Amino acid sequence: MSLVKKFATVASGTLMSRALGFGREMLMAAALGTGPVADAFNAAFQFPNTFRRLFAEGAFNAAFVPLFAKEIETHGTDGAKRFSEEVFGVLFTALLALTIVMELAMPLIVRYLVAPGFASTPGKFDTTVTLATIMFPYLICMSLGAMMAGMLNSLRRYFAAAVAPVFLNIILIGVLAYAWYKGADARTVGFGLAWGVLAAGLVQLAIVWVAVRHAGISIGFRRPKMTPSVKRLLILALPAAITGGITQINQLIGTAIASAQNSAVSSLAYADRIYQLPLGVVGVAVAIVLLPELSRALKSGNLIEAANLQNRSVEFTLFLTLPAAAALWIMSEPIVRLVYERGAFAANHSTPSVAAILAIFGLGLPAFVLIKAFTPGYFAREDTRTPMIFAAISVAVNVTTALTLFPSMGAPGIAVASAVAGWVNALMLLGVLIRRGHWGRDVPLMKRIPRLVLSAIVMAVALYFAEHWFAVRLGPGSPLVVKATTLLTLVAGGALLYFIAAFVTGGADFGMIRRNVRRGTAKAPSPAAKTEADD
């Protein structure tokens, strides 16, 4: 299977989840707006969700996948099963202990870490503590599920792990629809959503557990023991968790700072949901697929294949994310108006704030996606320390910039800090890869990047004038159908213009697309791949 086809397999599941996430956020915005319950739920959910993303998209994809792939290559399925059971025993025990401690300490965690600004509002603070207490066990389900998803990715079975998160949004949409049908108040809706998150965690864990069994590996529980393999995993996982989850760490910091201002937490959360669509569909898909592929190429000594994988991944991500970033920057207000502006979501206050945040997030989007493409170059070589150092620098930049800008800019200042930190991190990762000789100079890629940037600028200018031309049809007084058709037409026209400009300027060509779509792995199938074929 080609690299792009693997990206597409993961991205299709992620796209379903993100599309349903839009539906969820639209219903939530209508039910809660940017009021106190929305702030409380988003702050409470940010805490376990940050841990979930650290494990699911950070530590286990970065540390577990290369070690699991090595076990498959050297000891076959039996060795991989033994290693998985050793990790499962230690991980489950540690997560259970962590959850108990966190549940008991939740009032202190919310007061001093998650949302210190809520402490002056007792009702809001108490609601946040209760919601966070309900949702935190979600971490156990997601972390164990992340381990099994890493196994599936190493076995080149991507879809089950990609589609499992869809059920979080399905369940929460069901909760919101039922609350709307019953006419529930905001507090009842918030608690219903919290219990829905916990139920979704159990469902997602069940899906990947069944998929792993179907792949031929049945995981049993072993008494926790610090074997050499588990120790190696932990040594790699801690810095990888920090590095892989840098975006989430910055978001958690942003939430804590934003809690000092009413509606800021929920405004950040609503904007985050929109920009997570391109970030999740492209960035997460690239990170999930690239790491095991790059690990295999390096383990087999195929350095040309490894360099080609990295360059094609950057080519693919920039080809798709540059126009997305330009569209979010120019069209942020019409997008927010179409997606959220109804019910309790106020047009005169909520829309401008969320739109400003979304536009700034758009400028940081290419950096956030490039981080996902650059870090596998370190993780596949079992170097998690260097990206962790860069992540720490990025966090320092984020905190300093956010604290400087928040008093004057409010929530948009936090978005600026996040975007700046993302670009600092991406440039440091690329610079060291080049200095170490781990990033081969690819002349076609170097020629295409400025041409793709130029194509995105052409599209942005056209969208800017088109938005002003159709201002009445995109305005708050326009019917929903008119706004939707106008916005979709502009987005489709902008995308068409971008692709035409990319091909005309040489930023893209059919040869590039054919190479990415048809390119397969030029090596013999691994034992795991053979097992899958035999199934």
Image (cartoon, rainbow, N blue to C red):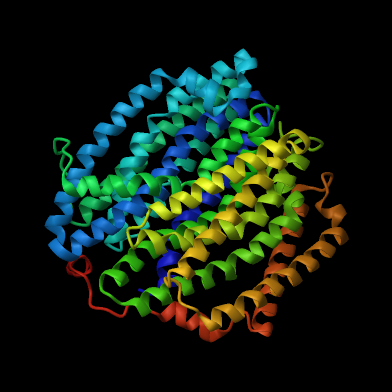
Taking the spot 39% from the left edge, 61% from the top edge, the residue there is 378
Residue 85 image point, x, y percent: 18, 45
Quadrant where the C terminus sits is: bottom left
Q: Nearer the viewer, residue 401 or 476?
A: 401
Of all residues shown, which one is farthest toward the top? Answer: 122
Quadrant where the N terminus sits is: bottom left
* 172 over 260 or under it: above or below: below
Taking the spot 34% from the left edge, 37% from the top edge, the residue there is 141
* 220 over 433 or under it: above or below: above
Q: How many marks?
A: 0
Of all residues shown, which one is farthest toward the bottom? Answer: 511
In the rendered image, is residue 375 in sight? Answer: yes
* Direction from residue 479 to residue 208 in the image, left or right: left
Taking the spot 29% from the left edge, 29% from the top edge, the residue there is 96
* Direction from residue 497 to residue 303 in the image, left or right: left
Q: Nearer the viewer, residue 269 or 412?
A: 412
Of all residues shown, which one is farthest toward the front? Answer: 435
Q: Quadrant of residue 100?
A: top left
Taking the spot 52% from the left edge, 65% from the top edge, the residue there is 431
Residue 191 image point, x, y percent: 51, 23
* Direction from residue 48 to residue 27 in the image, left or right: right
Residue 297 image point, x, y percent: 31, 72
Q: Quadrant of residue 396?
A: top right
Q: Quadrant of residue 189?
A: top right
In the rendered image, is residue 535 in sight? Answer: no
Residue 438 image point, x, y percent: 42, 70
